[in-house]
Image (spheres, rainbow, N blue to C red):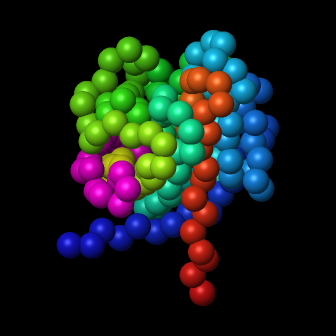
């Protein structure tokens, strides 16, 4: 059974990107400039509204300490990863999902790193957040009533210097 994945088009919002990250290539590529401090976050410039289904992908170019997901907060979090608190949900590169914790998460999917593509399927109609790894559907990661009631934003974080990821921009359909 094929799952419908409606692509969304956005860029990383340079005004909502940690100053320890570099945003290049038409605001699609993120590079971590330092290993000092906690995870550094970049928020997309697209509002994901209730009643919609959205899909996007990021490709890991270098490194192995990333979180990919959604946040309810449009404000840039500068003291840790977006999923360390109650406003963020993520798929962590160690093969865990994280929400409201910076140290604990359930095993999910598998670890990911260089050359892997992480897909995010966000169903705000059903209230479900799921992920893909290299085209393979990993199943439901989170279900929350919040997803159907609030606006969200695509978000990523990285930890170590020189880690890089790229927002995969799909071809636009006619």
Count of marks overlaid on the render? 0
Give the percent coordinates (x, y) of residue 112.
Answer: 39, 40
| Residue at the (57%, 59%) spot, across then down | 168
Tell whether position 164 is magenta: no
Q: Quadrant of residue 33?
A: top right
The magenta stretch is: 132-153
Give the percent coordinates (x, y) of residue 52.
Answer: 46, 61
Compared with 58, 18 (above or below) is: above
State whether residue 118 appears in this view: yes
Tell whether position 134 is magenta: yes
Residue 138 or residue 16, whichever sits in front: 138
111 vs 14, left or right, is left
27 vs 97, left or right, is right
Compared with 119, 80 (above or below) is: above
Give the percent coordinates (x, y) of residue 149.
Answer: 44, 45
| Residue at the (75%, 36%) spot, across then down | 22
Which quarter of the figure is the N terminus placed in? Answer: bottom left
Q: From this viewpoint, which residue is outermost toward the bottom? A: 174
51 vs 104, left or right, is right
């Amino acid at each position: 059974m094929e799952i419908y994945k409606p692509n969304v088009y956005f860029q990383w919002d340079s005004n909502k990107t940690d100053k320890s990250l570099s945003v290049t290539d038409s605001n699609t590529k993120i590079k971590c400039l330092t290993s000092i401090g906690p995870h550094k976050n970049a928020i997309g410039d697209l509002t994901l509204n209730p009643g919609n289904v959205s899909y996007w992908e990021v490709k890991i170019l270098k490194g192995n300490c990333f979180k990919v997901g959604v946040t309810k907060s449009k404000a840039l979090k500068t003291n840790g990863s977006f999923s360390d608190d109650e406003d963020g949900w993520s798929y962590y590169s160690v093969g865990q999902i994280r929400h409201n914790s910076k140290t604990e998460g359930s095993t999910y999917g598998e670890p990911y790193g260089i050359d892997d593509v992480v897909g995010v399927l966000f169903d705000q109609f059903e209230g479900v957040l799921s992920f893909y790894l290299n085209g393979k559907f990993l199943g439901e990661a989170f279900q929350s009533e919040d997803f159907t009631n609030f606006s969200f934003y695509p978000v990523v974080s990285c930890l170590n210097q020189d880690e890089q990821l790229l927002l995969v921009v799909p071809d636009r359909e006619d």
